[in-house]
Image (spheres, rainbow, N blue to C red):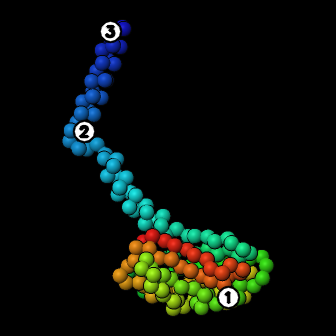
Amino acid sequence: MNYLKVILISLAIAASGVILYVLFSQGNFPNKQNDLVSNSTSSTSLISLLPQINSEGEVTVKVSPQDLSQFAISWDFEVLLDTHSGNLDQDLIKNSVLTNDTGDQFTPISWEGNSPQGHHRQGILKFQPISPKPTSIELRISKIGDVAERRFKWEL
């Protein structure tokens, strides 16, 4: 009975060895290095466009980039403003600028959202698409609450 167990275990080990040999020799075994490179590229583009929050002062500002492709009609940024003191009466078109990686500045073409009042505002700040597409962009919003300038930067 002990010999039968030894023979079965030996056969299982030999079969495992053959399977591993076949996988490695034919290239069917997953290449972790290449998988990591391809996954990190796609993950970077997703992660880099995540919303950003600035909570300086008494106003919290959250900015979420939308479609920033070359095919987009406009480059849109969802902006949420929240405070428990004071009014949010700033002109976001006047107080915002988008810069590219070479320092060129672009002003918004429109604001589609709540009017400048109250403790909570939400809307879309729209810009003309930048061409050629930069490697990074930075949205600067000034004079929100008692903070001179807030910066939100994304790698594209």
Q: Residue furthest left?
A: 26
Q: Which residue is mark 1?
A: 90
Would you place residue 109 above or below residue 39 in this image?
below
Tell me whether circle 1 and circle 3 mark residues in contact (CB < 8 Å). no
Tell me the residue at 43%/66% (across/down).
Answer: 45
Report whether residue 81 is seen.
yes
Which label sits on residue 3? 3
Q: For mark 2, give the secondary structure.
A: helix
Q: Residue at x 56, y 80 (%)?
A: 140
Gap between marks 1 and 3, in whole Å? 85 Å
Q: Residues within 10 Å of mark 1 (few under 14, many from 20)?
A: some
Quadrant assignment, res 95: bottom right
Q: Going 34% across and 52% down the picture, which residue do you hit?
A: 35
Residue 24 numbered mark, or none = 2
User: SS for tag 3?
Assistant: helix
Residue 29 in picture, x, y percent from top left: 28, 43
- Left or right for 94, reference 10: right
Label 3: how many Cα within 10 Å (few below 14, some 14–19, many 20+): few
User: Relative to residue 12, is residue 100 drawn left or right?
Assistant: right
Q: Which amino acid type is shown beneath numbered disc 1?
A: Gln
Q: Is residue 87 left or right of residue 132?
A: right
Marks 2/1 in contact by CB < 8 Å: the verdict is no
Amino acid on which disc 2 is placed? Phe
Q: Nearest the camera: 122 or 152?
A: 152
Which percent across, then down, holds residue 141? 60, 82
Disc 2 crowd, CA 10 A, few/some/many (<14, 14-19, 20+) = few
